[in-house]
Amino acid sequence: MQLLTEPYLQQVKRWPLSGRHILAQFDDTSVVVYQAFRPAIGHFAAEYGYFGGEFSLQRMSWIKPNFLWMMYRSGWGTKIGQEVILAVRIQRSAFDTILAAAVHSHFVPDIYSTKAAWQQVVGDSSVRLQWDPDHNPSGAKVERRAIQLGLRGEVLAQYARHWIVNIEDISEFVGQQYQYIRSNDWTELLIPQETVYPVQLSSVIQQLGLSAIKPELFS
């Protein structure tokens, strides 16, 4: 497996306890996002390195840079239709493009001048943004918020074919780690190494509603 991993109990100490933050595994040129699919779609993508076959470009597809949020959503790969967990490494410049195009899926008065203005922007956008409660490995909510991004239209087409560096089926790894969730013993639990993703542009920080990183926010 190409993903870098680290014990959960070690890295959680470095994460903010609250606020809106993008936790992700990234390097200078790429960012990892996660998706869960039924076998026909997931196996095709892992084999060919792009999304095709039964994957639909006509419906919104949600990506999550936060591994534990993906685990919560998919039930650690046990939910029907979400059995295949993919780690999709995309170009970092593409991830920044996605963030810059993101529009909140609900009206946020601090960001949009009027509800009508938001409705116009969200209707035209190819990227939807949602902040949801993050979760610990057992699925309990924490105060920190996790981001998920819905892609459609031209952005989805670019993501599916052109922005991908590689796709890895990590279902076996997920299944191995799930044993520690079932036994409620996190001492040996490994998850992909994640840190707070640094968004550089102040305009995008404001648009996303990102929280400032303060030392007192960390565990």
Image (spheres, rainbow, N blue to C red):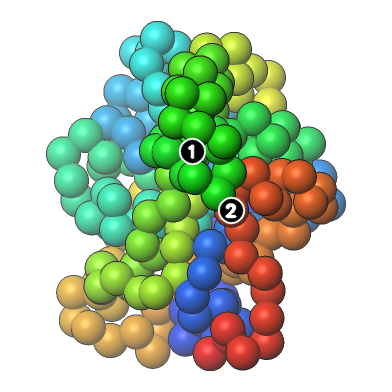
- 144 to the left or right of 136: right
Q: Amino acid at mark 2?
A: Gly
First in sequence, mark 2 or 1: give its number.
1
- 113 to the left or right of 170: right
In the rendered image, the vertical position of residue 114 relative to residue 201, given as above or below: above
In the rendered image, the vertical position of residue 169 relative to residue 199, given as above or below: above
**Residue named by callout 2:** 209
**Which quadrant is home to the N terminus?**
bottom right
Q: Secondary structure under badge 1?
A: strand
In the rendered image, the vertical position of residue 180 relative to residue 82, given as above or below: below
- 106 to the left or right of 39: right
Q: Amino acid at mark 1?
A: His
Q: Residues within 10 Å of mark 2 (few under 14, many from 20)?
A: some
Q: Residues within 10 Å of mark 1 (few under 14, many from 20)?
A: many
Q: Is residue 88 visible?
A: no
Q: Residue at x 44, y 52 (%)?
A: 131
Question: In the rendered image, which quarter is residue 214 located in?
Answer: bottom right
Residue 6: x %, y % from top left: 56, 76
In the rendered image, the vertical position of residue 122 relative to residue 98, given as above or below: above
Q: Nearer the viewer, residue 142 or 84?
A: 142
Mark 2–mark 1 CB contact (< 8 Å): yes
Residue 192: x %, y % from top left: 54, 64
Residue 59: x %, y % from top left: 37, 16
What numbered label is drawn on residue 135? none
Q: How many marks?
A: 2
Question: In the rendered image, which quarter is residue 38 located in?
Answer: top left
Q: Secondary structure under badge 2?
A: loop
Q: Nearer the viewer, residue 72 or 205?
A: 205
Q: Residue at x 28, y 77 (%)?
A: 180
Q: Residue at x 34, y 68 (%)?
A: 135
**Residue named by callout 1:** 104
Q: Is residue 100 visible?
A: yes
